[in-house]
Image (cartoon, helix red, strand yellow):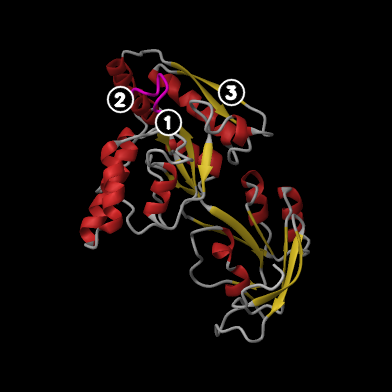
Amino acid sequence: WQSGVGTGGYMLENFDPGVNTITKRFAGYWKEDAAFFDSVENLFISDVAARTNGLRSNELDSIANLDLKTLHLLKRDPDINVVPTNGNKHCTLPMHCDAAPFDNVDVRLAIKYAVNREEMLEKILKGLGEVGNDSPIGPANIYRATAEEMPQRPYDPDKAKWHLQQAGMEGLAVTLHTADSAFEGAVDAAELLSQSARAAGMDVTVQRDPDDGYWSNVWLVKPWCASYWGGRPTEDWMFSQVYSAGADWNESHWDNPRFNELLVQARAELDESRRREMYVEMQRLCSDDGGALIPIFMAYTQAVRGNVGLPDQLANNWELDGHRNAERWWFNG
């Protein structure tokens, strides 16, 4: 932070951790037609209402992570453009595959068939995103399985009941741990799952845990909880960090020998079509055997003042154009 690497479009003027960062344009930037602002100030504002009010009052030019419950009001403002982008961010409800009853694959499949994904997408995300298929590979990844390669898992209470019968666990009763800090709408999403699972004869108790300490006391600790991931730019990165045997963040404690074998082989495979086949098979294994229920992918949400110019295509790997808004955006007029 004292000297920087000297290759960016802006020079650091002030950095106050947790408060703001102020930069000014570097005239010698090596990229042409980029970094159009004279200066950029990034503010850390944790309160979503304060962020929204700052944008509406013209104190801020852009904000990210919008309040979905009041988004319809923001869209009515003629001086503001709401810009959602579908990417790899997704919510997960990981089940520990080494803990009963989730150590039975039929129980895991029963739960996956017992969630109404379309309802969750509309009620929790207001339609901003897409339904998940119990694989973490999203629309920003190049080897994502198509609908033909991996058909969408539907809401099917009868099939869920069948899997419970196969497991010998009709009338399954389980507890799902969650908190608002897991992801926006996590508690409501858990309640929706509990309601939809009743049609399959399941009793899902939603345990709302404190936000404070959730990521140290609940995540990776409780056998079933709510979580989320921003996704990763490559399939190998996502799979290696969260789904490979022994990974520190393997939140479902999943260990599938075939998956682990393919993960290593795919890294060295030079044939593009064969490599794709490997990653598609890994996605199927996650969906059909894995412990992660992935019901929805969450759109990145941002909003800008009407005078902010945007490129035709926004990056879908993170908020604010992949956090390259300072480089790629501009002021109109």
Q: Position of residue 40 (x, y in %)?
A: 71, 71
Callout 1–callout 2 Cβ contact below 8 Å = no
Disc 3 target residue: 207
Disc 1 target residue: 115
Location of the C terminus (image quadrant): bottom right
- Asked whether residue 264 is drawn in magenta, I would say no
Callout 1–callout 3 Cβ contact below 8 Å = no
Q: Which residue: 44% across, 29% down? A: 95
Disc 2 target residue: 159
- Label 3: state its secondary structure: strand
Residue 46, disc: none
Q: Write down the quadrant of residue 5 in the picture.
A: bottom right
Q: Position of residue 2 (x, y in %)?
A: 72, 70
Magenta-drawn stretch, dominant element (helix, strand or loop): loop
- Label 1: state its secondary structure: loop
User: Front-most of 57 and 295?
Assistant: 295
Q: Mark 3 or mark 2: which comes first in sequence?
A: 2
Position of 54 compared to 249: left or right? right
Q: Write down the quadrant of residue 43 in the picture.
A: bottom right
User: Front-most of 15 and 19?
Assistant: 15
Of the two numbered discs 1 and 3 in the rendering, the one whose residue sits closer to the viewer: 3
Span shown in magenta = 97-104
User: Front-most of 16 and 298?
Assistant: 16
Q: Position of residue 236 (x, y in %)?
A: 37, 53
Of the two numbered discs 3 and 2 in the rendering, the one whose residue sits closer to the viewer: 3
Q: Is residue 102 above or below residue 311?
A: above
State the CA–CA distance, disc 1 to disc 3: 17 Å
Q: Amino acid at mark 2?
A: Lys
Q: Amino acid at mark 1?
A: Val
Q: Amino acid at mark 3?
A: Gln
State the CA–CA distance, disc 3 to disc 2: 26 Å
